[in-house]
Amino acid sequence: MKEWEHPLIESSIVADHANSEHRIPFGQHSTGQSKENLAAELNLRGKIAAIFPSINAIHAHIDADEAYRLSRDSRVLLVEQDITTVPVATQSNPGWGLDRLDEQTPLLDNTYSYTNNGAGRTIYILDSGLTLTNSAVAAEFSGRASVIWDVNGGTGSDCYGHGTMVASAAAGNTKGVAKGATVIMAKITDACTGGAQVSTSITAFDWLRDNAPAGTIVNWSHGFTNGLNNCSTPLTNTALENAIKAAHNKGIIVVVAAGNDNCDTANFTPTRIAESFVVGATNNQRISQGKDAKAFFSRKGGNISTFAPGENVVLMNQSGSSVTNSGTSFSAPYVAGLFAIACQAAGQVCNTATSAAPLYQALRDKGKLGTVTNTDGTPLTGATSRFIWQQW
């Protein structure tokens, strides 16, 4: 029999963060419920790998016949197959992305100016890891970064590169927006690939919902794709959406990359749900015309909260070198950094939120409408023309 779910490798702690709220190991549920007892109650022909109490769900290793049997059990609402997500790529000479982010209009001055730097705020990055034993990478975060978990049971090092680039955009000293924020990396990808099982992301969001305080920022620069020019077939996962909703409803800010296939966000998890703060990508090709042009690859859709630079932006890779890369994967962490700075400037507002919804709207309200255009410079269609700049 073929396995219905991809196996989820047992989780391990790499380095627990110093804050006292982290009492339960990352990836472990807090109810104390026995996996073995639950399997016996369900008469499960397989193994329960994880329990997700925030969404009343489990991750099980079972074959297709057992999945069908469970789907007909009156106690089971839904059975979904695990699938793989993919990565979706005053300071002088900061690169055009940072340069644009501190400007109210698309006019660059070759500087990145800021009053606040996100100090006191925490950004969790769910990605391919961070190699803090590399001196250049470590220096980019000056002791502000740590690795809390590696789904592979390793040290959380980044042998793929995506996680380092995302972290550098969010909070790097030279490449990032929030240069004083704390970065906590959870390596959710399989070994040295960019792929991550959906169940692993659910594990992360489930833990964050129960262990991270309100106002915590989470960056998820992954997504589902059917491939370029195959936009009409929806690709969704209810369990992941429910896990994000549960975290959002505890005041956790979830920033998500829109995706890189030029499709509509409405057809994909989790960009279709309001509990995701979805970020599309722009380029600098029409900056001289006073326009933020949508990157040709960026998704569109009514659920995109804002656009941010994402084409040919300057980042740091896993070797500690400066590189140029493109993707909404890097637009999203720019906005995660903006949230960190805005929450710092707002005092206790983010800390006392009972839902992330008002925080999402407050940041949207700070954006400027009308500067983002279609790739060819015509008025933007298919999404709200909003660009949120760093104004704190």
Image: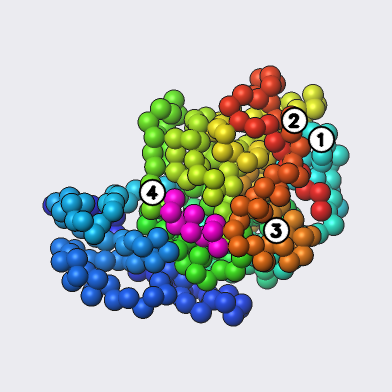
Q: CA distance from mark 2 to mark 4?
A: 34 Å
305 or 198: nearer the viewer: 305
Q: CA distance from mark 1 to mark 2?
A: 7 Å
Q: Is residue 244 left or right of residue 281?
A: left
Majority secondary structure of magenta residues: helix
User: Mark 4: which secondary structure?
Assistant: helix
In the drawing, what numbered circle is on residue 238? 4
Other-residue count near label 3 (Cα within 10 Å), few / some / many at <14 / 14–19 / ≥20: many
Q: Residue 50 at what x, y percent from top left?
A: 33, 66
Label 1 close to label 2 by CB (< 8 Å): yes
Q: CA distance from mark 3 to mark 2?
A: 24 Å
The residue depicted at 66 percent of the width and 54 percent of the height is 359
Q: Residue 33 at what x, y percent from top left?
A: 32, 76
In the drawing, what numbered circle is on residue 105? 1
Q: Which residue is mark 3?
A: 340
Under mark 4, the amino acid is Thr
Label 1 close to label 3 by CB (< 8 Å): no
Q: Is residue 91 left or right of residue 301?
A: right
Q: Which residue is mark 2?
A: 371
Q: Earlier in the sequence, mark 2 or mark 4?
A: 4
Q: Earlier in the sequence, mark 1 or mark 2?
A: 1
User: Mark 3: which secondary structure?
Assistant: helix
